[in-house]
């Protein structure tokens, strides 16, 4: 259990269920640890004030090396709002007590994990610009739905059924380790 209650927000987009599975595992782990965690699809999160949370977790599927369109629009809207309010400062000072984790699910039958790097780095930069410490950049393999060939013969091998239990257990372990950084 957490000594001081942490308020967390998990925002995700999911096209095939891969990212939703990961977001659910994150929420489950936070709940078990006594964290006040809210889970929202990106379509329902536009009015959320990110600074109201100690921890914000943002997850997306990777599409052509980038976040989903819904996540891109969310980040653009938030950057505009924070810019107008003057929250974005030179040298991007970190606001004490504000942490973020960004994660993506990816299949990339062509180049593997390298195709997911731009997606996660893009989201990390968003949080750094608004003063959050980026406490995690996570990559989770997900099945390429709709193409058996791309799910079995691509760069990552046979990824059918992923994220699987082992993948979700790894995510749970990362969440548990992250919570230790809150003291």
Image (cartoon, rainbow, N blue to C red):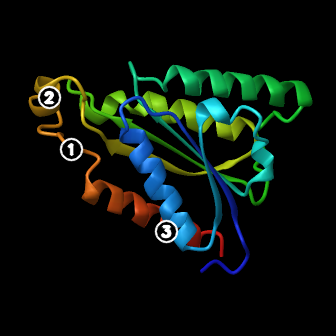
Question: Which of the two residues, 143 or 120, is positioned nearer the viewer here?
Answer: 143
Which residue position holds label 3? 177
Cα distance, mark 3 to mark 1? 26 Å
Is 74 placed above or below 100 here? Answer: above
Which residue position holds label 2? 154
Which residue position holds label 1? 161
Q: Earlier in the sequence, mark 1 or mark 2?
A: 2
Q: Residue at x 21, y 44 (%)?
A: 161
Give the image location of residue 98, x and y in percent.
73, 54
Give the image location of residue 120, x and y in percent.
48, 35
Q: Say which quarter of the image contains residue 53.
A: bottom right
Q: Say which quarter of the image contains residue 49.
A: top right
Query: Within 10 Å of the Cα at label 2, are there few (<14), some (14-19), or many (20+) other Cα atoms?
Result: some
User: Label 2's element?
Assistant: loop
Q: Say which quarter of the image contains residue 34.
A: bottom right
Q: Nearer the viewer, mark 1 or mark 2?
A: 1
User: Label 1's element?
Assistant: loop
Give the image location of residue 105, x and y in percent.
38, 38
Q: Residue at x 27, y 32 (%)?
A: 107
Q: Earlier in the sequence, mark 3 or mark 2?
A: 2
Q: Residue at x 42, y 49 (%)?
A: 22
């Amino acid at each position: 259990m957490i000594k001081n209650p942490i308020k967390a927000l998990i925002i995700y987009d999911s096209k095939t269920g891969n990212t939703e599975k990961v977001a659910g595992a994150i929420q489950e782990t936070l709940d078990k640890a006594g964290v006040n965690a809210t889970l929202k699809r990106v379509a329902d999160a536009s009015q959320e004030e990110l600074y109201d949370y100690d921890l914000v977790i943002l997850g997306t599927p990777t599409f052509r090396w980038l976040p989903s369109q819904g996540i891109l629009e969310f980040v653009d809207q938030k950057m505009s709002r924070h810019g107008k309010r003057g929250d974005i400062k030179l040298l991007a000072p970190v606001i004490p007590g504000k942490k973020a984790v960004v994660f993506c699910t990816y299949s990339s039958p062509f180049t593997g994990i390298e195709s997911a790097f731009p997606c996660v780095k893009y989201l990390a930069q968003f949080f750094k610009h608004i003063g959050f410490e980026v406490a995690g950049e996570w990559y989770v393999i997900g099945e390429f739905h709709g193409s058996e060939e791309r799910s079995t013969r691509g760069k990552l091998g046979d990824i059918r059924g992923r994220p699987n239990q082992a993948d979700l257990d790894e995510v749970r372990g990362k969440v548990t380790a992250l919570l230790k950084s809150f003291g």
